[in-house]
Image: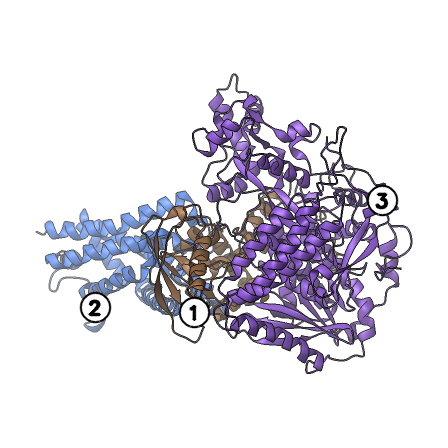
Amino acid sequence: MSVLNSKVPKGPIKDKWTTYKDKINLVNPANKRHIDIIVVGTGLAGGSAAATLAELGYNVKAFCYQDSPRRAHSIAAQGGINAAKNYQGDGDSTYRLFYDTVKGGDYRSREANVYRLAEVSTNIIDQCVAQGVPFARDYGGLLDNRSFGGVLVSRTFYAKGQTGQQLLLGAYSAMNRQIARGKIQMYNRHEMLDVVKVDGKARGIIARDLITGKIERHSAHAVVIASGGYGNVYFLSTNAMGSNATAAWKIHKKGAFFANPCYTQIHPTCIPRSGDYQSKLTLMSESLRNDGRIWVPKNMDDVMAIREGRKKPTDLSEDERDYYLERRYPAFGNLVPRDVASRAAKERCDAGYGVNATGEAVYLDFAAAIERYGKEQAKIHHIENPSKAKITELGEAIVEAKYGNLFQMYEKIVDQNPYKTPMMIYPAVHYTMGGVWVDYNLMTTIPGCYCIGEANFSDHGANRLGASALMQGLADGYFVLPYTIGDYLSDDIRTGPIPTDSKEFDDVEKEVKDRIDFFMNNKGTKSVDYFHKKLGGIMWDKVGMSRNATGLKEAMVEIKAIREEFWKEVKVPGGANEMNPELEKAGRVADFLELGELFAKDALTREESCGGHFREESAEEDGPQKGEAKRNDKDFAFVSAWEYKGEPADAVLHKEELEFKDIELKQRSYK
Amino acid sequence: MSGFFKSSIGRKVAMALSAFFLMFFLIIHLAVNITSLFSVELFNQLSHFMGTNPLIQLALQPVLIFGVVFHFVMGFVLEIKNKKARQISYAKNNGAANSTWISRNMIYSGLVILAFLVLHFIDFWFPEMKVKYIEGDMTGMIAGTQEFRYFDELQHKFLEPWRVGAYVLAFVFLALHLLHGFTSAFQSMGSTAGRKKALQNFGKIYAYAIPLGFIVIAVWHHFNHL
Amino acid sequence: MNLTLKIWRQKDSNTKGQMVDYKVTDISEHMSFLEMMDVLNEQLVNSGEEPVAFDHDCREGICGMCSMYINGEAHGPDRGITTCQLHMRMFKDGDTITIEPWRAKAFPVIKDLVVDRTAFERIQQAGGYISVNTSGNTQDANAIPISKHAADEAMDAAACIGCGACVATCKNSSAMLFVGAKVSQYALLPQGQIEAADRVRNMVEQMDAEGFGNCTNTGACEVECPKGISLDTIARMNRELMKANLK
């Protein structure tokens, strides 16, 4: 038997969570006062967990590297949050949300976890409304829903284009209430640099005060990692500049298995890169694809003319345009899932049809939608024989009402008016489905060390559906972890405070300090960003949207070489005992340089295409699906959980076999 | 409630309340003075009434003085507090990009108005107090005649061009002060009415009309001295 | 384009700072302002100098971390944006750009352009929440209908990102737009009514204790606010506080 025990409870899937909750051990309220919990990261998962644990009575210490918990990158989520409320009466149910999520994840997630997620999704909405989250409402005063990619019902709740922000501010307000009560001790501008294990259990962390540079010891009875995803391994992503994998990677190195690192979501509608100086990419909501048509020119001459500024996209007639998604996927057209849309854009740009100077951009055109809406409005307003200008005016008003903020954002960045000329878009790294392996309790393979939110691997399989990340973060933090952690902590009611003057703390603190000293003393010649950009380049080219064995093997070798160069040549100015952003970056990039290699190794091992992971060797060879991703359920229906053994290349694979008892496995088709 | 007026917002409200009172007073003051342009008799009667009515003299006048003093003192207190809230100032600050000069410099328009009030008190109020309450002459008559002294005194004061000039200048600053102060007071009182076009327009009319009225009176009497 | 930058450098909160001049060359007009700062910092690192510390994170205008006073304006000369959304096309070749940290007693400088905004945290902790347990066992989300108008207005107030531009730009360093936005969000929703009086009293008390100045209704905050928070939120807060004290 595998060393991995997912601890999924027995019984029918719809009763698992309820029955399990009834039976697990609890800690009585008086004893919770004697138990400390560390929460690292204060996004939707960490923030909601910290608030709830504190409310239950535990003593919580929460850490974030930003100057306020409110700034965690969950705040950037635009579109919405799914919940199986079925307020629209369109046939939604817990089962359907569960089914959509498993299918959307290309059958690589753990059924029991996903069902639980769907089950608690409705509580999230109740909770958030009670907290004063201003969700959009209809004229009757009830909550409004919108529909999102890949599903057949309207189950997405939203707060303008700022759903993530509002949900995070809700969790943040719940935290503030507990901070005011003294139940949460908040450590802003602190970064966890390692985990401390005592007798094999996670008992604390070493953190650096980012203002003074002081290395601090913090002990607790359990440690919760909620530090988000590792998309910044690509250097360019839609993640925040500070988003990093250090907390997750450090627990990995201390014994937590890392699962499915190769599952990365590349979001199709991002603003393209404009030059080498680019520091990050900006995402625009997927909802744009409801009304925008994606195309590139049919003829190479036109591509060149556009790049050189001799022609404008609006000069091209309909038959000079290649609406490649509509051509390849007549059934779903521009609304194919994220991974399919992203790969199709890459395919066209690789073939040389990219429409901007970098050759990495396709058009997202609203002209047809503007005309359609314009005519519709003219009818509604009884305007006979409207002029073209009138139609455009009416149509633009509708498009503005739907996407005004996105259009404005685009215009601010690109300096082009998307009402008049098509937007340029290109896929960008957005979310990482992979992460630290956790069991049903959300505990990692280190006892007492939990991992929640994007940082863990559990719910989205190989691909995440739109509006599900927010759902998972809050489900983990508000409603799952606070229950399951009690089961573990019930053994700790007599342990008493964990001392920080032990040898274990001494040792880990020394490791951390040694590494900082190394950075401060290394006489290198190259900046941290130099290495990060180089790593990102390899990741994007060889471990990006489409992957093959040769490229992945090369990537592993190259990443290792960069890592070796990094440790010789990195240059970190400033001092250790002060605010030093370069030092912070150095530590994070050092970890990315290891993670990147494991990432490539995982992608190499998984010789199938599934979700965000596309192996060129595993594509349909003929028939109507020719060229499309081909999943291999016979050989690869498992979770790859990697055990750290020194070098990333030496990591040992443990398989958690995935069983699908409640869902039939099917090949996805969008033709 | 005393706690309320110690809070930052309470003080704003207090500023606004005193401002409303002062703005109301300006209307009365102008209404009385404007009569001097067309009816000596009416002006004299109104002046006498205002100057001798016990309710006005013993109740409203102290309230007015308190209002004036309060508005100034609180204005200074807040200004000092606000200055303290930024200890190092910007090397480069482009205030004009986001607000009007007037709104940022209420303290200066206020100071000009204060200086004017000192002159105005010396011109009218102190002599008046002396005649009425120290000399005990409550008749309002020019000594030894049956004629009211008010109009005569008024005209006499505006003989000198420098005083007329000072008054006009002060009224210009009063206009500036009111241009921001009128709508600002609504905002401080928790009303968004001051942000509505209609009231903003009314505020503008008020801010121009009141000082203009006073200017006309001063200039008129300067040039129409008999 | 080539630019001269005048940047506030300060080692830490205990050291005196000063403006230092730097030159950057070959800046593309498509760069964001912070990418231009990245170029400067890369240049400084390579020449062995300490890079300029500045707060930034999401770089898409929502986290509220970035905070620079550029050429005399919070978040620079453009409107409706944060510093990270400012692009170099707003400047011309040969320009001199003055870059300073937020200036307010309540926002002490930590280093260079980084300031300490924890005063905002303490204000929120004083009452910027609804006291509801996070058990999920509340009533159904649709149990209380809320008018679309109120919900939309609450959302507009809730859009505040807590960047502190309002304080930085206010001639009085007043935090009233920030506090007014939070008070308004809850005041507009039925969920917020139960604790409304205590909330506004406590938050205003904390705001005053932090040493922010008083509002004189210049309206500068509203103009510079990257999220267009309305001055009406301040009026509402004033009203709420009066109401709370009349009870």
- A48 vs B118, nearest the viewer: A48
Which residue: 40% across, 43% down? B197
Q: Amino acid at mark 2?
A: Phe
| Residue A382 image label | none
Image check: B217 left or right of A397?
Answer: left
| Chain A, hue in figure | purple
> Which residue is label 3 attached to?
A634
Residue A188 visible in rendering: no
> Which residue is label 2 attached to?
B126
Q: Secondary structure at mark 2?
A: helix
- A612 vs C148, nearest the viewer: A612
Q: Chain of mark 3?
A: A
Q: Chain of mark 2?
A: B
Q: Chain of mark 1?
A: C
> Which residue is label 1 attached to?
C105
Whether tag 3 and tag 2 are in contact, CB under 8 A, the answer is no
Q: Secondary structure at mark 1?
A: loop
Query: In the image as oriented, which residue stretches furthest toward the right?
Result: A11
The total of numbered circles placed on residues is 3
Q: Is residue B189 above or below residue A299?
A: below
Q: Is residue A621 above or below residue A213?
A: above
Image check: B93 left or right of A72?
Answer: left
